[in-house]
Image (tube, grey):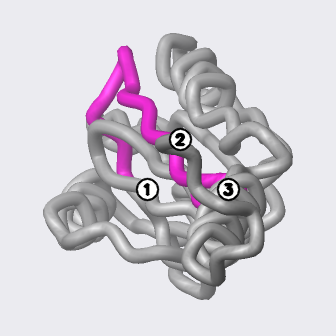
């Protein structure tokens, strides 16, 4: 008596709308987990906690990375994940700079003549806003020059 007749156009329209919403919701669910930022931060922390000179690398399973002095963020199609460093702050390094050469393994004494020049270079990039960079790996190096200690992190 109170049932909707199956041949009514509004019943079919409502069913189609519900099916479209459910299909759109299912399509929007990511098929993979977000990147593992905690493991990347742990890799940085393992080098930062070591006595200089120490070095390490970590392969990133993400499309882009944003490194700040206190943590990092990874981004992929599956989402965004953030993790903080336990042994920060670190120095995020831009590719193609003298600090990047040191992070990759060049002798810091050959690149920077004194602890003051090294500290000046690290201070210049420490407080800069973090930017998204495409990268395949993190290169981490803990160095000491002229009494100045720093953990350099390069997205390469």
2 left or right of 110 in image = left
Quarter holding residue 36? top right
Query: Residue 146 vs residue 24: left or right?
Result: left
* Alpha carbon separation for disc pair 2 and 1: 65 Å
Say above or below: 140 vs 93: above
Q: Is residue 57 left or right of residue 64?
A: right
Select label 1 or label 3 by which is in front. Answer: 3
Q: Residues within 10 Å of mark 3 (few under 14, many from 20)?
A: few
At x 39%, y 75%, the residue is: 131
Asked whether disc 3 touches disc 2, contact meaning CB atoms under 8 Å apart, the reply is: no
Q: What residue would you read off at disc 3?
A: 22
In the rendered image, residue 43, in percent from the top left (x then y), is placed at 66, 26
Residue 1 tag number = 2
- Number of labelled discs? 3
Magenta segment, which residues? 75-91
Q: Is residue 76 visible?
A: no
Residues packed near mark 1 inside 10 Å, few (<14), some (14 to 19) or many (20 plus)? many
Question: At numbered mark 3, what does the secondary structure look like: helix, strand or loop?
Answer: helix
Instruction: Tell me if 20 is positioned left or right of 57 in this view.
Output: left
Nearer to us in this view, 53 or 1:
1
Which percent across, then down, holds residue 87?
A: 37, 18
Mark nearer the N terminus (2 vs 1): 2
User: Of circles 2 and 1, which is in front?
Assistant: 2
| Residue 25 visible at all | yes
Pointer 1 or 3: first along the chain: 3
Quarter of the image where the C terminus is located: bottom right
Q: Which residue is mark 1?
A: 67
Q: CA distance from mark 3 to mark 2?
A: 29 Å
């Amino acid at each position: 008596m109170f049932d909707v007749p199956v041949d009514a156009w509004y019943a079919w329209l409502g069913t189609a709308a519900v099916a479209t919403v459910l299909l759109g919701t299912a399509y929007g669910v990511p098929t993979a987990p977000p990147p593992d930022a905690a493991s990347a931060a742990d890799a940085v922390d393992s080098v930062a906690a070591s006595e200089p000179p120490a070095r390490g690398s970590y392969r990133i399973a993400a499309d882009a990375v944003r490194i700040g002095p206190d943590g990092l963020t990874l981004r992929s199609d599956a989402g965004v994940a953030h993790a903080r460093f336990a042994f920060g702050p670190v120095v995020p390094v831009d590719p193609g700079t003298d600090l990047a050469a040191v992070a990759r393994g060049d002798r810091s004494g050959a690149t920077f003549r004194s602890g003051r020049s090294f500290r000046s270079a690290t201070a210049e990039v420490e407080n800069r806003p973090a930017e998204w960079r495409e990268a395949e790996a993190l290169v981490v190096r803990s160095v000491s020059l002229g009494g100045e200690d720093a953990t350099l992190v390069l997205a390469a």
